[in-house]
Amino acid sequence: MLKPSFVKKIICSSAVLLSLFIHHTLNAQQDYMLYNMQAVPQRMYANPSFRPTDTTIFIGLPVLSSEYFSFGNSGFKYSDLIRPDGDSLKADVANMISKLAKENYLSLSYHMDLLSFGFGLKNNYFSFNATERVDIRFGYSKDFFNFLWLGNGDPSTIGQPVNLAPSLNIIHYREYGFGWSRHINDKLTVGAKLKYLYGEENVSTENTSASLTTDPNDFALTGQANIDVNTSGVTNNAFNNFNVMNYLFKKKNGGAAIDLGATYKYTDNITFSGSLTDLGFITWNTDVTNYESHNANASFTYNGIDLDQFINNKSLNFGTVMTNTLDSAKKIFKIDTLHHSYTTMLTAQMYLGANYMFPWKGNAGILLHGEIYDQALHPSVTLSYNQTVGRWLTASLGYSIYNRSYNNIGFGMAHNLGPVQLYFISDNVLGFFMPQNAQNIMFHFGLNISFVHKRPAQKKAQL
């Protein structure tokens, strides 16, 4: 029996955490409904201490076992930009800009399992997966769109540095994961996954900045920039000398990562869980090109065109003046092209979950999730109800707040037909029916072969 004081502390602490997450929600990798779908083996990707219920062996069919796609934009949705105007449509740029935060993020991900399997052995569960992962994250500022739309003469921009530089991280790699989970006792289960990473392509900005300031007195423009862009596998040389075997297995872009997780059964009805995943890196050595500022944080001031120089020199034309101006800027903002290896970190993920179990094989859960990207924590929160019907059906319904979006209704279902398991999950099913009003679109589906453990029948006592 829980003491009222303890329950009160849990409720107060949860309320504080929830308010913090809601207030700061910006952007996060999706797949929240999967976390509480106990029958689906792929939920081990979110917490390595998890294992599929009643399953001793599962085999993920190559390519078909896990297909994951997500798109998210924390800045605006389609209907913010394209709005009805009578019988036609119009682009309302001002309305779209008004929806932006100071910093905004667009993300696109595609993950595909090439091979996966798992099996139980006494108190242990072992698993393996080989997964192709493509993750794209693009950051853009409200200042940038304001400058394009209003120009440099708007009062809101005069005298203030306008941030123009986007952030970009495109990464394609293959993950080989070796997972292990163990029941320590009736209450505690721990898990870990070691991962070898094989990098294929990457484009990433690091310490890149660009700003433009308009002088309030003479409207002179002062630009300041620092460029640091690293690429691997995207040069003409990489495409011209393409070889399938070299591409798939012989690139020298190696890395490693680890997932850690734990589940604690506080009472028969209350369970807590938590994990840290994708704690790792990749070092890029193959087909590397780096673009770096020759003069870090250099600045250039453009005072406009002096008409007197045209009057005093009739041979001078506008094209020549602009060419000379651009040449001066190029000398100051010189970009060096280099070829040295570099290291990128994965986007680390954090999960904290709590579930209340009902006697009818249902449970209610809360999940707090955060990812660390662009030197900031981007959180989300999910509430869900999950129901198991025998051994043939698991269904989940949920609600999530993420990407500064509050209309995300999640749904998940796993259906077992004998040893064949088919599952489909979405963190925002409304995105399929009303994509113009959605900032997030996500789905995850797959096909597994699952062998259910059957306990031997107890022998009747002889009279």
Image (cartoon, rainbow, N blue to C red):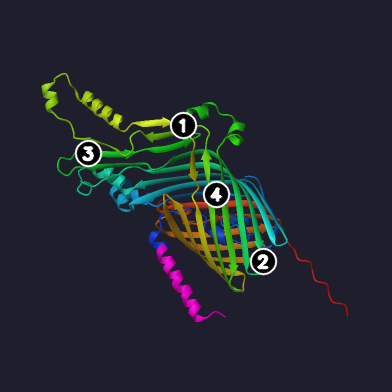
- N-terminal of the pair, mark 3 or mark 4, is 4
- N-terminal of the pair, mark 1 or mark 2, is 1
With 278 as the anchor, is 107 left or right in this view?
left
- N-terminal of the pair, mark 4 or mark 2, is 4
Q: Which residue is mark 2?
A: 390
Residue at the image position 11 percent from the left and 22 percent from the top: 312
Question: Where residue 72 sits in the image (x, y, percent)?
Answer: 44, 50
Q: Magenta segment, which residues? A: 1-20
Q: Quadrant of residue 309?
A: top left
C-alpha separation, residue under disc 4 versus residue under disc 2: 27 Å
Question: Where residue 204 sits in the image (x, y, percent)?
Answer: 44, 41
With 358 as the anchor, is 166 left or right in this view?
left
Q: Quadrant of residue 274?
A: bottom right
Q: Which residue is mark 4?
A: 68
With 331 as the anchor, is 30 left or right in this view?
right
Looking at numbered disc 2 in the image, what kind of residue is underneath it?
Gly
As helix, strand or loop, the secondary structure at mark 3 comes to strand
Residue at the image position 27 percent from the left and 45 percent from the top: 162
How many marks on residues? 4
Circle number at residue 339: 1
How many other residues sit within 10 Å of disc 1, few (<14), some (14-19) or many (≥20)?
some
